[in-house]
Image (spheres, helix red, strand yellow):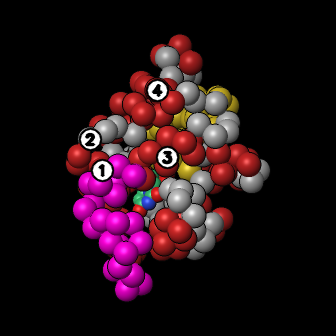
Amino acid sequence: MEKTFVMVKPDGVRRGLVGRIIGRFEDAGLRLVGIKIMRPDEGLVRRHYPDDPGWLRIVGEKTLGTYREYGMDPVERMGTDDPVEIGRWVREGLVEFITSGPVVAMVWEGNHAVEVVRKLVGSTIPLFAQPGTIRGDFSVDSPDLANREGRPVYNLIHASGDAEEAEREVKLWFRDEELCTS
Ligand code: UDP
Ligand code: MG
């Protein structure tokens, strides 16, 4: 049995989507083993989104991918086309956004839980997320709109990207005794 970390971000909580998001994971047969509503402090969010060049690059590349797709010039709009620099800008916005209101932190357990949850959550950019996924069904946001408004992409939910990230994030957000594991 694998465990994965999921967080309903402030936009998902504000929109009253917590119940429906939980329902999607329950419907798929995953088991809820930890849950709490909280307002994370800046330090926790900074540890959650690490200042790691590899991660910053991936996030920046996603932004650049959308710009390419829509024929927009990143230098004109953001002053740079360096993915790491763009990733760093997105990270600062995320710190501000994730600390802006309550989030619901959860741990889900099941067969291939990390992969199953990512499939149900859908692509990072809601504009590109398939219908039937949480991000595809409940949001239309995109990096071009987000950048224009000086904020990260609002995509309702965070889910660990792989097993290593899941292990790190479960430990970061929950103490052992807060989890009802089998
Ligand atoms: N993000 C963004 N613009 C991008 C890529 C990411 O605002 O072009 C934000 C978005 O909120 C995303 C978070 O940064 O959920 C973390 O990015 P990651 O690549 O880890 O995506 P996720 O794992 O959340 O799908
Ligand atoms: Mg991620």
Q: Residue at x 64, y 40 (%)?
A: 100
Q: Give how far apart the Cα atoms at labels 4 and 3 are.
A: 12 Å
Q: Is residue 136 above or below residue 168?
A: below
Q: Is mark 3 within 8 Å of ligand 1?
A: yes
Check disc 4 and report its element: helix, strand or loop.
helix
| Between discs 3 and 1, the one toward the N terminus | 1
Q: Nearer the viewer, residue 140 or 164?
A: 140
Percent position of residue 36, x then y: 64, 28
Sequence order check: which comes first, mark 4 or mark 1?
4
- The stretch of residues the image draws in magenta is 68-89
> From this viewpoint, which residue is outermost toward the right?
16
Q: Residues within 10 Å of mark 2 (few under 14, many from 20)?
A: few
Assign the magenta stretch its main secondary structure: helix
Question: Label 3, on which residue?
Answer: 94
Is there CB contact under 8 Å for labels 2 and 3?
A: no
The answer to which of marks 4 and 3 sits earlier in the sequence is 4
Q: Amino acid at mark 3?
A: Leu
For the residue carrying disc 1, how many other residues have a C-alpha within 10 Å: few (<14), some (14-19), or many (20+)?
Answer: many
Using the rendered image of the protein, determine whether residue 11 is visible from the camera's viewpoint. Answer: yes
Q: Which amino acid does the dot numbered 2 rest on?
A: Asp
Give the structural element (helix, strand or loop) at label 2: loop
Q: Outermost residue toward the bottom? A: 71
How far is disc 1 from disc 2 in space, using C-alphas? 6 Å
Q: Which mark is residue 52?
A: 2
